[in-house]
Image: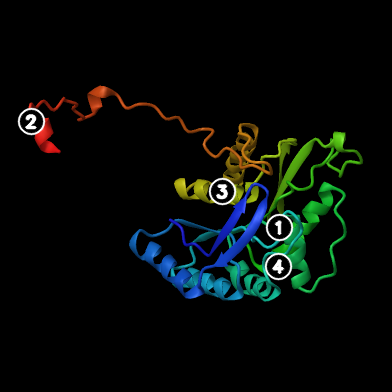
Amino acid sequence: MTATTALTAQNTQGVVDIHHVPSAFVSKQIDACIDDIGVDVVKIGMLASAETVEVVASALERHGRPTCVLDPVMVATTGAQLLPHPAVTNLRKRLLPLTTILTPNISEAKLLLENFGMEQFPEIKSVEQLVQLGALLQPMGPKYILIKGGHLPLDEDLNVPKKPEDRKYVVNVLHAGYDVMLYITEFSTSKNTHGTGCSLASAIASNLARCQDLDVWSAVEDASRYIEAGIKTSPDLGRGSGPINHFHSLSMTRPPREESSLEIRPYITDQYEDLR
């Protein structure tokens, strides 16, 4: 079930416009979903405004603080800031303490640190700095932090490559206290990576919801495999950055005839002209 916070006019080449859904209506959507069907895991993406951040935080508190995967959509791939500063502050103060897993990309993690009053984080040149970036976010409240490194491929030694041809790996870093796990996948030159961050967070949330005994480490592992396969099998759509293939593991077959109640018979009449 979905509570829509904003509508976008976009294609593979970029976002044309954004329409913000009124915050009060977002609250009604959330309550309508949870009051009827309930919720096992919440995944949060683009929130658009400080008012909507407050509404979502209040809803989480009102509904018993369910497991929450927060993908803080704040910075576009182009570098443009999508979330105004008051909303970033509200997100940090209100939502992060309620978050089970925070999944920022590098730019979003840096923005949260700056909003927290820390000095500007230096340009990342190695996996060690990716680990440090996640460690600095931990005092803000999330139980787990997954730094997504998809925008910064690394070389064989897990450093930023000096030449494009040396790009070999993509590394996501998961923190839980002093425990850190690296999720390393091969770098792909595919241009079809539109929405990978959102899809990764959604896959983590889905994994946790479908199996209540699944730990976060395994949920991230399964989600990482899902995204890698989605990129490898993606079709070329549009003239820009196309979407990944979300249906790579879905098989559609015709149901067996013996299990269907369908009956097909011709309608025979010599009065057909009278039916018109």
Name the residue beneath numbered marker 2: 271
Indicate the position of residue 38 as horizontal and vertical percent values: 38, 60
Tell me the distance, in whole angstroms, between the alpha carbons under discs 2 and 1: 65 Å
Q: Position of residue 109 (x, y in %)?
A: 73, 61
Residue 172 at x, y = what percent?
71, 47
Q: Earlier along the polypeptide chain: callout 1 or callout 4?
A: 1
Q: Residue furthest right?
A: 162
How packed is label 3: few (under 14 Cα within 10 Å), some, or many (20 or more)?
many
Which labelled disc corresponds to residue 139?
4
| Residue with the mark numbered 1 | 76
Query: Looking at the image, is mark 3 or mark 2 earlier in the sequence?
Result: 3
Decide: marks 1, 4 in contact (CB < 8 A)?
A: no
Of the residues tagged 2 and 1, which is closer to the observer?
2
Name the residue carrying label 3. 204
Disc 4 crowd, CA 10 A, few/some/many (<14, 14-19, 20+): few
Could you tell me how far apart the alpha carbons at marks 4 and 2 are, in whole angstroms? 80 Å
Q: Position of residue 136 (x, y in %)?
A: 76, 63
SS type, badge 2: loop
Q: Are marks 4 and 2 in contact (CB under 8 Å)?
A: no
